[in-house]
């Protein structure tokens, strides 16, 4: 007889809400919620200057691979561009169209640019913890990750005067969500790509809210022209996503459109034109709720309270 062990994959949920998702009852009868997320990661990426033994090879936008044991000045300069130039262009675009965003801030980066952190909050945006470092936490020991979570919260709270209530690792490991719940104080996390509406989980016996993110409705496809080459490419794709979800909302099934941005990517002049066009386009519709992650979490908790533990 074979040794029959429980299948660990049974913990996955491939069903979700199924063919009849709940009506989220967005505020003021909105038929779509749009959440812009601006990633500010420069200074937190892999680099010898951060104590790593390898340089950053992901989303550096110039196709330079990771190098072990050496600093790579061009890669570091790409990340610096985001917080020196690109972020201000994007923040000005949000101001122009009166849209509040979730700023996914890497604490190690923002502690090197504290005025940027303060400016984001002063302009009315939500500061979300994007972790202490912009690294892959699948390869980080549990205790180190636990320390990083606490350190990220402490740094952001010191910089902007308020504790972040949202979390987005970006590259979470198998322990990440449990460690967040054990740390406490978070209304939600964004480390999921599997839905278009928030949903509740039970983690370590406690209810925990997940607001899905997107690597698809995301300017990461500008990276080395891996999908988007021009501002028009970005605008067209995001417009089409908006149009389909708006249509579904009109038919009684409102959804959330989560759009991911990066200061070093969309912040380039030839790309930001696409974001400006998109903001202008969306502002031309009634029934659109532009919301931060915290706005969505607070609404969902009121409309769909956490289930009681069984």
Image (tube, grey):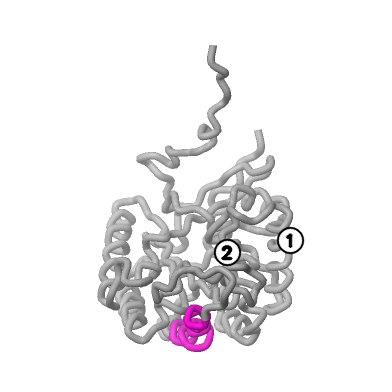
> Nearest the camera: 3 or 96?
3
Decide: few, some or many residues near mark 2? Use Cα within 10 Å; few <14, some 14-19, many ≥20: many
Snapshot quadrant of residue 224 = bottom left
The answer to whether one can see residue 302 in this image is no
The residue that disc 1 covers is 147
Q: Does the magenta stretch include residue 48?
A: no
Foreground mark, 1 or 2?
2
> Nearest the camera: 277 or 153?
153
Q: Is residue 292 above or below residue 115?
A: above
Left or right of 65 in this view: 130: right
Task: Tell me where the magenta segment starts and ends, as one range.
Answer: 73-92
Q: What element carries label 1?
A: helix
Decide: few, some or many residues near mark 1? Use Cα within 10 Å; few <14, some 14-19, many ≥20: few
> Nearest the camera: 120 or 139?
139
Q: Is mark 2 on a helix, strand or loop?
A: loop
Residue at (52% x, 32% y) in the render:
10
Residue at (42% x, 49% y) in the render:
23
Residue at (32% x, 84% y) in the render:
270
The residue that disc 2 covers is 135
Left or right of 295 in this view: 265: left
Distance (Cα) linking label 1 and label 2 = 14 Å
Left or right of 302 in this view: 268: left
Q: Does the magenta stretch include residue 83?
A: yes
Which is nearer the N-term, disc 1 or disc 2?
2
């Amino acid at each position: 007889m074979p040794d029959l062990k429980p299948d660990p994959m049974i913990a996955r949920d491939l069903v979700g809400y199924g063919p009849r998702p709940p009506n989220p009852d967005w505020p003021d009868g909105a038929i779509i919620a749009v959440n812009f997320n601006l990633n500010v990661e420069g200074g937190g990426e892999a680099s010898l200057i951060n104590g790593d033994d390898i340089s950053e090879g992901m989303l550096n936008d110039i196709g330079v691979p990771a190098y072990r044991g050496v600093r790579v000045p061009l890669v570091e300069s790409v990340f610096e561009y985001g917080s020196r130039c690109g972020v201000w262009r994007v923040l000005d675009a949000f101001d122009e169209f009166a849209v509040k965003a979730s700023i996914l801030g890497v604490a190690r980066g923002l502690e090197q640019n504290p005025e940027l952190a303060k400016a984001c909050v002063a302009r009315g945006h939500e500061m979300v913890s994007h972790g202490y470092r912009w690294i892959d936490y699948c390869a980080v020991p549990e205790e180190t990750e636990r320390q990083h979570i606490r350190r990220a919260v402490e740094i952001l709270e010191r910089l902007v005067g308020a504790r972040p209530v949202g979390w987005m690792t970006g590259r979470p490991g198998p322990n990440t969500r449990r460690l967040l719940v054990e740390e406490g104080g978070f209304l939600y996390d964004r480390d999921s790509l599997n839905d278009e509406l928030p949903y509740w989980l039970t983690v370590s016996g406690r209810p925990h809210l997940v607001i899905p993110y997107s690597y698809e409705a995301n300017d990461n496809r500008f990276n080395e022209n891996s999908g988007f080459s021009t501002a028009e490419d970005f605008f067209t794709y995001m417009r089409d996503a908006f149009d389909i979800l708006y249509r579904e909302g009109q038919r009684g099934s409102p959804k959330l459109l989560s759009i991911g941005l990066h200061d070093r990517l969309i912040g380039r002049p030839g790309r930001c034109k696409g974001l400006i066009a998109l903001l202008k386009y969306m502002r031309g519709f009634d029934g659109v709720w532009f919301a931060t992650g915290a706005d969505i979490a607070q609404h969902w908790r009121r409309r769909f309270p956490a289930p009681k533990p069984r």
